[in-house]
Image: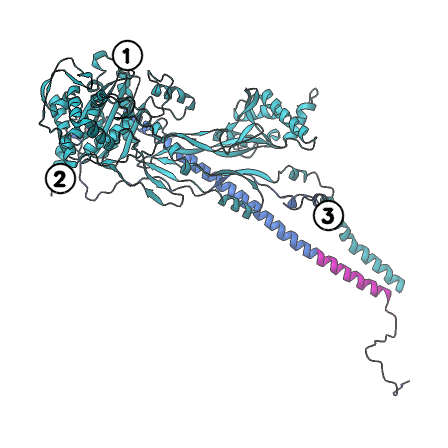
Chain colours: A blue, B cyan
C-alpha cells in the first residue's frame, strides 16, 4: 500500500534483502586476487626489467672481453709481423737468393721532381684500453632473499 | 542452495589458491633453500678485482718499422682455492678410487695440459702457509679463495718469494682446450673438470721484434715488482709498472708508459667506463734511426771488431744538417730478448783500466774517452776561425814542441819538417796543433771549446753522460794541459759530443742538437714532429768550408783508406792512448763526412783496444777502411748519388 504523504529518506539505500554471504566472499576473493595479480604483475615488471639490465650488463662485459681479446691479438700480430719482416730476415733472404750490396757507382739514379719523403707505414695509435676477460655478477642477481635480509641486517647493503 | 554455493566458492578458492601456494613454495625454494644448480653462482667472485691497462707505446724506426711492440702473456689464478687446499690436507684416495681433486692434482694436470713446469710440492706448501696465515689473522673467518699460481718458490734473504707463472699465447690456448673452451686439433671438445676453476688474466709484455738491432737507442723496458706502484698478491707481484731502463725506453718513459691499475669490476657497464677513463693511452715514438743503415753499421762494426781483435766499438751516423741520428751501433750489442746477458755486455762496454767494474749501456752517449787526433779538427777550426793561422801558415816541425814545461812529441819519432796547415792535419802532427793552441792562448782556445760544447752534455734525447774538459783555474789544470788538449789528450768526450762538435765543420759552422726521436704520435692521432734546432755556431761558415776542403784534400793527398770511390769525402783519423796509460792499448777512431760539397752524413767510428798486429792499433788502419765500406752503403740507402751523377742531375734542365 502506498503512503504518498511520507517522503523517502535521501542518500540511504534500503535493501529488501540481506546480501548473500557467497557474493561477499566471491567479491573479497576477487579483490584479493586482483591485488595479488597486480602485485605479481608489478614485481614481474621489475624482475623482467632487472633481468634485462643484468643480461645487457653481462653482454657488455662479454663484448668488452671479445674486443680486448681481438685487440690483444692485433697487437701481438703486429709484433709477429714485424719479426717476420725484420731486417735480419731480409738480409738472410737476400743472401740466400744470391743478392749482393750494389756499389752506388753501378746504380741508376733517377731524379723525381717534388718527390716526397716516404710516409711511415705504422698503424695508428692505440686508443682503447685493455681489460681482462671474464664476467662477474653482483649479489643482487645471485643471492636469496634470506641472504639479502641477513646481509642487510649486518649492514652490508647493496654494493 | 546456499550450502551448494558455499561449497563451490570454497572449491574455487582452493583452486585459485593452489597456483598462489605453488608460486610461494617455488619462490621459497629459490629464495630460501637454493638448489644445487644455483651453487655455481656462489663460486662467481664478487666484487672481482681486475686490472685495466694500455699497451706501452710502440717504437718505430724512421720508416715505420716496428722496433718495440707488445705481446700478451697470461697469469693463472685458481678460484675456490680453499677447497683444494683443504682436500690436499685431509683427503686421501682409497683403493681403486679416482684420486681426490687436490691442489697437487690440479697442478699436475695443469702441467700436463700446458707443458709448463711447476714445483708442485713447493708451490702447494707455500699456498697452504698463506692460507694458514690468513686463517690465523682472521680467527678462521677467512680462507684463501683465489690463488695466484707460481712456477716455484725460492728463498730470498730468509723470505719465501714466489716466481710468477706466466703463460704465453700457445700455452694459454692449450689450457683453454683442456678446459673444454676450445676444440682440440681434431675439432673435439675435451672437458677436464679438474681444471675448471683455473682462469687466466692477460697482461701486456714488451717485445722487440728486431732483437738486438739498435738496442742501445731503443733501450729496454723492465718488469719488476720492487718499484713504486708495484704490489704483491699471495707472494706474487700482482701490479707492476713497466719502466724503461735505458735508451728512449728510459728517456721517454713518461709518455711511453701505459696505464695499469686494478679496478673493482662490476656488472654495471657505466662503472667500468668511468674507471677506464682514468687511464689514458700512451704515445708512440718514431725514431730518426734508419734500420737498414743501423743494420749495415752493426754488421760492419762486428766484422771489424772481430778482425782486429778489439774489445768493443761504436759507430755513429749523424745527419749534420738536422742533428738526426741515423744509426748508433755498439759492439757488443745488447740482445733485447736475453735480459740476463745485459750485465756482461754492459761490463764489456764499460770496463776501463781505471774503472774495472764499469758498466755502460751505450758507448756513443755514455762512455767518454780521450778522443785523440780527431780532436785536432776542433783545434784547427779555432785557429782558422780566430785568424791565428791560415791554411797557408807554415809550421816547421822538429819532432818535438815544448810548452808549459812539457815536451810534446809526434806519433812517429821523425820530424815532418815544414808543413802547411793541411799537411799538419794530413800527417796528424801533434807538435803543430800544440803550436796552434799555444798561439791561440788558453783564453781563446777554451772559449772555442766552450763554443763547441766540449765538456757539456749535447742535449740528445737519451740518458747521456758528458765528458770533462779542464779549464784554467781548475785545480789540475796546468799550462801543459793546453798543449795536450790541442791533440785530444787530457780531455774526454763521448763519441756523440765530438761528432756534434765536428758536425759544425760539415754544416756551415752550425751545430744542431742531436736527437733520436723524429716525431711523437699522440693518443689522439696528432703527430708532433721534432724540429731541428741549432745548438750553437762555434765558427763561421767560411771557416767551416775552408776546413772542410782542407780535410778532404788531406785524405786525397794521403790516399787514405777512408776514401770512397765516386764520392768526395772529408775526415780525420784518431789514435788515442787509454788513461791511465798503463798499457799500449789504443782507441782507434775516424770521423768522416760527405759528400764534401753538400755533407749529408757524418760518421764517427770508434774501435777500442784493437790488436797492434799489422798496425791495427792506428785509426788509419782500423777505422778509416771501415768508413770507406760503410759510407757508400749509407749514401745508397739514403739515395745520394755519386758526385758525378749528382752534378749531371743538377745540371740537367
> Is B567 in front, or is A20?
B567
For the N terminus of chain B, give its image quadrant: bottom right
Using the rendered image of the protein, determine whether residue B186 is visible from the camera's viewpoint. no
Q: Nearer the viewer, mark 1 or mark 2?
A: 1
Instruction: For mark 1, give the secondary structure.
Output: loop
Main SS type for the magenta part?
helix
For the C terminus of chain B, give its image quadrant: top left
> Is B539 in front, or is B124?
B539
Q: Which residue is mark 1?
A: B583
Using the rendered image of the protein, determine whether residue B195 is visible from the camera's viewpoint. yes
Q: Which residue is mark 3?
A: B27
Q: CA distance from mark 3 to mark 1?
A: 93 Å
* Comes first in the chain, label 2 or label 3: 3
Residue at 83% over, 62% down: A25
Relative to A94, say whether B22 is above or below.
below
Q: Chain of mark 2?
A: B
When asked about the image quadrant of residue B563, the answer is top left
Q: Which residue is mark 2?
A: B650
Instruction: For mark 2, give the secondary structure.
Output: helix
Segment tinted magenta in the rendering: A17-39
Amino acid at each position: 500500500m502506498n503512503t504518498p504523504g511520507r517522503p523517502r529518506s535521501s542518500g540511504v539505500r534500503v535493501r529488501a534483502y540481506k546480501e548473500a554471504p557467497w557474493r561477499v566472499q566471491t567479491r573479497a576473493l576477487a579483490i584479493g586476487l586482483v591485488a595479488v595479480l597486480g602485485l605479481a604483475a608489478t614485481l614481474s615488471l621489475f624482475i623482467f626489467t632487472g633481468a634485462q639490465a643484468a643480461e645487457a650488463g653481462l653482454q657488455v662485459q662479454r663484448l668488452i672481453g671479445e674486443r680486448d681479446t681481438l685487440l690483444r691479438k692485433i697487437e701481438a700480430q703486429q709484433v709477429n709481423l714485424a719479426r717476420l719482416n725484420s731486417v735480419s730476415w731480409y738480409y738472410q733472404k737476400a743472401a740466400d737468393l744470391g743478392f749482393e750490396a750494389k756499389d752506388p757507382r753501378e746504380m741508376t739514379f733517377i731524379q723525381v721532381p717534388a718527390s716526397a719523403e716516404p710516409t711511415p707505414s705504422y698503424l695508428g695509435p692505440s686508443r682503447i684500453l685493455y681489460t681482462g676477460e671474464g664476467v662477474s655478477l653482483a649479489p643482487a642477481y645471485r643471492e636469496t632473499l634470506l641472504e639479502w635480509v641477513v646481509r642487510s641486517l649486518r649492514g652490508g647493503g647493496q654494493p | 542452495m546456499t550450502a551448494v554455493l558455499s561449497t563451490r566458492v570454497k572449491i574455487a578458492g582452493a583452486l585459485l589458491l593452489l597456483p598462489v601456494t605453488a608460486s610461494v613454495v617455488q619462490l621459497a625454494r629459490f629464495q630460501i633453500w637454493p638448489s644445487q644448480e644455483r651453487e655455481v653462482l656462489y663460486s662467481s667472485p664478487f666484487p672481482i678485482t681486475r686490472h685495466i691497462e694500455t699497451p706501452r707505446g710502440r717504437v718505430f724506426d724512421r720508416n715505420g718499422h716496428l722496433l718495440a711492440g707488445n705481446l700478451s702473456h697470461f697469469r693463472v689464478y685458481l678460484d675456490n682455492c680453499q677447497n683444494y687446499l683443504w682436500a690436499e690436507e685431509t683427503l686421501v684416495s682409497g683403493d681403486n678410487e679416482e684420486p681426490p681433486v687436490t691442489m697437487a692434482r690440479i697442478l699436475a694436470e695443469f702441467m700436463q695440459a700446458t707443458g709448463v713446469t711447476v714445483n708442485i710440492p713447493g708451490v702447494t706448501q707455500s699456498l697452504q702457509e698463506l692460507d694458514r696465515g690468513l686463517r690465523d689473522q682472521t680467527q678462521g673467518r677467512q680462507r684463501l679463495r683465489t690463488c695466484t699460481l707460481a712456477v716455484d718458490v725460492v728463498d730470498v734473504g730468509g723470505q719465501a718469494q714466489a716466481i710468477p707463472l706466466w703463460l704465453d699465447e700457445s700455452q694459454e690456448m692449450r689450457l683453454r682446450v683442456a678446459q673444454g673452451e676450445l676444440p682440440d686439433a681434431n675439432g673435439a671438445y675435451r672437458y677436464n673438470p679438474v681444471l675448471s676453476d683455473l682462469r687466466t688474466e692477460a697482461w701486456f709484455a714488451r717485445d722487440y721484434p728486431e732483437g738486438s738491432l739498435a738496442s742501445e737507442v731503443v733501450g729496454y723496458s723492465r718488469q719488476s715488482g720492487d718499484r713504486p706502484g708495484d704490489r704483491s698478491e699471495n707472494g706474487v707481484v700482482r701490479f707492476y709498472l713497466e719502466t724503461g731502463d735505458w735508451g728512449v725506453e728510459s728517456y721517454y718513459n713518461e709518455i711511453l708508459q701505459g696505464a695499469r691499475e686494478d679496478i673493482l669490476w662490476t656488472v654495471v657497464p657505466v662503472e667500468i667506463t668511468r674507471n677506464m677513463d682514468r687511464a689514458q693511452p700512451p704515445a708512440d715514438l718514431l725514431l730518426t734511426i734508419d734500420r737498414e743503415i743501423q743494420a749495415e753499421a752493426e754488421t760492419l762494426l762486428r766484422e771489424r771488431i772481430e778482425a782486429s781483435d778489439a774489445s768493443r766499438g761504436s759507430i755513429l751516423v749523424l745527419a749534420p744538417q738536422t742533428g738526426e741520428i741515423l744509426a748508433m751501433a755498439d759492439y757488443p750489442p745488447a740482445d733485447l730478448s736475453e735480459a740476463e746477458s745485459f750485465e756482461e755486455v754492459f761490463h764489456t762496454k764499460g770496463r776501463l783500466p781505471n774503472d774495472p767494474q764499469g758498466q755502460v749501456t751505450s758507448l756513443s752517449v755514455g762512455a767518454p774517452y780521450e778522443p785523440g787526433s780527431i780532436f785536432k779538427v776542433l783545434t784547427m777550426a779555432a785557429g782558422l776561425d780566430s785568424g791565428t793561422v791560415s791554411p797557408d801558415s807554415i809550421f816547421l816541425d822538429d819532432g818535438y814542441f815544448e810548452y808549459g814545461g812539457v815536451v810534446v812529441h809526434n806519433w812517429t819519432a821523425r820530424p815532418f819538417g815544414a808543413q802547411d796547415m793541411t799537411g799538419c792535419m794530413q800527417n796528424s802532427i801533434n807538435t803543430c796543433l800544440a803550436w796552434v793552441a799555444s798561439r791561440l792562448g788558453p783564453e781563446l782556445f777554451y772559449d772555442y771549446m766552450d763554443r763547441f760544447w766540449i765538456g757539456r752534455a749535447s742535449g740528445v734525447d737519451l740518458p747521456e753522460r758528458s765528458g770533462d774538459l779542464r779549464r784554467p783555474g781548475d785545480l789540475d789544470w796546468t799550462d801543459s794541459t793546453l798543449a795536450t788538449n790541442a791533440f785530444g789528450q787530457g780531455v774526454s768526450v763521448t763519441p756523440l759530443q765530438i761528432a756534434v762538435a765536428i758536425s759544425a765543420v760539415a754544416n756551415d759552422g752550425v751545430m744542431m742538437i742531436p736527437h733520436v726521436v723524429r716525431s711523437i704520435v699522440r693518443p689522439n692521432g696528432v703527430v708532433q714532429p721534432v724540429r731541428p734546432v741549432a745548438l750553437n755556431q762555434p765558427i763561421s761558415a767560411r771557416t767551416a768550408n775552408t776546413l772542410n776542403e782542407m780535410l778532404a784534400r788531406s785524405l786525397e793527398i794521403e790516399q787514405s783508406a777512408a776514401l770512397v770511390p765516386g764520392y768526395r769525402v772529408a775526415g780525420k783519423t784518431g789514435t788515442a792512448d787509454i788513461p791511465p796509460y798503463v798499457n799500449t792499448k789504443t782507441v782507434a777512431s775516424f770521423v768522416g763526412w760527405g759528400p764534401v760539397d753538400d755533407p749529408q752524413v757524418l760518421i764517427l767510428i770508434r774501435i777500442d783496444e784493437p790488436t797492434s798486429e799489422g798496425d791495427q792499433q792506428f785509426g788509419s788502419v782500423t777505422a778509416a777502411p771501415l768508413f770507406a765500406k760503410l759510407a757508400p752503403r749509407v749514401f745508397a740507402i739514403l739515395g745520394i748519388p755519386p758526385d758525378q751523377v749528382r752534378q749531371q742531375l743538377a745540371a740537367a734542365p
